[in-house]
Image (cartoon, rainbow, N blue to C red):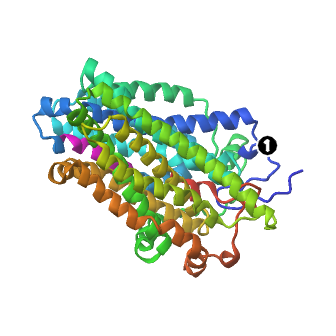
């Protein structure tokens, strides 16, 4: 019999309960995880496939490139609502309910985007495609937290992050061939068809959220459901607004950990999603690449994402082994989760200057493309590191607010940066545009080192800290004393 305690919040079921997702057969947990990754993949794939057809949008609707980029940005602005509303939807519909309602609505607006006969319709449909698809991105982390134990936080975050990143990188790769062969409208319909296949794949998904499982089981057996502890995301409208709107806004100006991580991740996401606009343009002007060839260059981004996942996993295992050998009784402070961000910051800063000064007709095209690989490697390493750190930085409610703040901020910047990247390149040249990003990245490089040194002290002094925050440590590779709540801490998947 297991004696490992299960905490309140999201995980409220007995460790011995057969319906507890922790006790499901491995194949069922793998299937549920695969469904979550596939749903997230389909949303980011739908985001970036559009970029391959921007010149077609310009021609059909007689708009400038900046205006044609707007539906790409609006998609992210729609997604930005997801971290705020998804925790509350999950409390009422369960995770599976949100998944199976969200994706069809997403598909409906992708269809509308492809059928649009004027630019306004295209822009509106793209916004609502992001709005309704966003919960599929947000839920992935909570789903993994439901079925995999908390001691694997770093490990499963490294894996689940691959879905959205690879989905985004695959978008222009597929979209380039689709646009060349069928026109820009098919850059909407291909993601639509893919999402429909994903939806069919996910129809067999079991509910994973403990609170919903308990309520549904009681209903199925015709008995009154036990009284559950109040959800960390709030019960009344006032509480819900406090947790996912007011407190995140407050943390963005009062919590150094949230401020540092949000700004760094926001900048990183702004730059990486500007690549989907700038890389095809730069490769075409510098090396006369076709749209198909420019799309193939994003294979480098896929490789970079895989390297980031592997690096993070290996770093996690090595760190744990070294610390435990020093006699830590199996406990590792969560600040050690920041080590991949230290490496990632160096890779990201160096790669921005690399890209800036190698995108030159006198230098082989492979040089800036490999620089992109290194950038994605560093970028994703920082994301995995920071989010897994935030995941346990505060008690459940404070963590939910911190994750919401960080998620909304970086998603908004992912939509903002593409709107001015072309003007930067035109006015500063590509070399100095990306050198500017490199200088900004260099200024931010010390952030993970600062948090590593002072993070525990900052957490302990926070008004969101619980009574054990002064001595809180978590093992990264062994069972901990209690699991964190699933929805309340795992709802911000981006």
Q: Residue furthest bottom?
A: 461
Q: Residue furthest top?
A: 181
Q: Residue furthest front?
A: 362
Query: In this figure, what is the number of numbered marks?
Result: 1
The residue segment tinted magenta is: 68-79
Q: Position of residue 57 (x, y in %)?
A: 19, 32
User: In the displayed structure, does residue 326 sit left or right of residue 451?
Assistant: right
For the residue pair 287 and 401, the one nearer the viewer reads as: 287
**Residue at screen point 54% across, 80% down:** 463
For the residue pair 278 and 93, the one nearer the viewer reads as: 278
Is 76 rendered above or below residue 46? below
Q: Position of residue 177 (x, y in %)?
A: 32, 22
Residue 165 seen in the current view: yes
User: In the displayed structure, does residue 155 sit left or right of residue 264?
Assistant: right
For the residue pair 90 and 78, the one nearer the viewer reads as: 78
Based on the picture, tell me whether residue 70 belongs to the magenta stretch: yes
For the residue pair 52 and 39, the one nearer the viewer reads as: 52
**Residue at screen point 40% across, 75% down:** 253
Is 442 rendered above or below residue 286? below
Q: Residue furthest right?
A: 1
**Disc 1 secondary structure class:** loop
Classify 10 Å Cα crowding around label 1: few (below 14), some (14-19), many (20 and above): few
Is 429 rendered above or below residue 41? below
Q: Position of residue 335 (x, y in %)?
A: 61, 67
User: In the displayed structure, does residue 44 sit left or right of residue 142?
Assistant: left
**Residue at screen point 14% across, 29% down:** 60
Residue, disc 1: 18
Which SS does the magenta portion mostly show? helix
**Residue at screen point 71% across, 56% down:** 12
User: In the displayed structure, does residue 171 sit left or right of residue 219?
Assistant: left
Based on the picture, tell me whether residue 283 belongs to the magenta stretch: no
């Amino acid at each position: 019999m297991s004696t490992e305690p299960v905490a309140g919040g999201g995980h409220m079921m007995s460790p011995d309960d057969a319906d507890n997702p922790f006790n499901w057969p491995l194949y069922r947990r793998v299937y549920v995880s695969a469904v979550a990754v596939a749903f997230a993949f389909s949303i980011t794939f739908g985001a970036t496939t559009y970029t391959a057809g921007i010149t077609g949008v310009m021609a059909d609707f007689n708009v400038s490139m900046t205006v044609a980029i707007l539906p790409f940005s609006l998609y992210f602005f729609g997604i930005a609502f997801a971290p705020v509303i998804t925790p509350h939807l999950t409390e009422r519909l369960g995770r599976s309910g949100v998944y199976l309602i969200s994706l069809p609505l997403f598909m409906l607006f992708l269809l509308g985007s492809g059928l649009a006969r004027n630019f306004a319709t295209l822009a509106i449909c793209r916004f609502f495609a992001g709005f309704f698809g966003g919960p599929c991105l947000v839920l992935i982390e909570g789903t993994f937290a439901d079925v995999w134990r908390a001691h694997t936080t770093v490990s499963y975050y490294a894996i689940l992050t691959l879905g959205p990143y690879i989905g985004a990188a695959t978008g222009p790769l597929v979209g380039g061939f689709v646009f060349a062969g069928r026109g820009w409208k098919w850059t909407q319909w291909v993601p639509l068809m893919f999402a429909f296949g994903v939806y069919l794949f996910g129809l067999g998904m079991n509910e994973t959220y403990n609170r919903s499982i308990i309520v549904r089981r009681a209903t199925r057996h015709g008995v009154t459901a036990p009284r559950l502890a109040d959800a960390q995301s709030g019960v009344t409208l006032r509480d819900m607004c406090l947790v996912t709107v007011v407190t995140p806004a407050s943390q963005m100006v009062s919590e150094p950990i949230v401020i540092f991580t949000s700004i760094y991740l926001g900048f990183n996401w702004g730059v990486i999603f500007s690549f989907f606009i700038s890389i095809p343009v730069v490769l075409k002007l510098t090396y006369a690449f076709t749209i198909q060839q420019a799309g193939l260059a994003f294979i480098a981004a896929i490789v970079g994402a895989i390297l980031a996942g592997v690096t993070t996993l290996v770093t996690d295992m090595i760190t744990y082994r070294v610390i435990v050998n020093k006699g830590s009784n199996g406990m590792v402070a969560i600040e050690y989760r920041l080590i991949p961000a230290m490496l990632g910051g160096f890779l990201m800063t160096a790669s921005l200057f690399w890209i800036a000064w190698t995108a030159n007709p006198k230098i082989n095209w492979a040089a800036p493309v490999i620089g992109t690989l290194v950038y994605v490697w560093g970028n994703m390493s920082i994301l995995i590191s920071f989010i897994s750190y935030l995941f346990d930085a505060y008690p459940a409610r404070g963590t939910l607010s911190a994750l919401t703040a960080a998620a909304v901020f970086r998603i908004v910047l992912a939509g903002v940066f593409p709107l001015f990247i072309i003007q930067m390149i035109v006015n500063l040249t590509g070399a100095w545009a990306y050198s500017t990003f490199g200088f900004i990245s260099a200024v931010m490089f010390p952030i993970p080192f600062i948090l590593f040194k002072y993070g525990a002290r900052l957490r302990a002094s926070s008004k969101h800290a619980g009574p054990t925050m002064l001595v809180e440590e978590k093992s990264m590779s062994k069972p901990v004393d209690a699991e964190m709540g699933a929805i309340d801490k795992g709802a911000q998947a981006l």
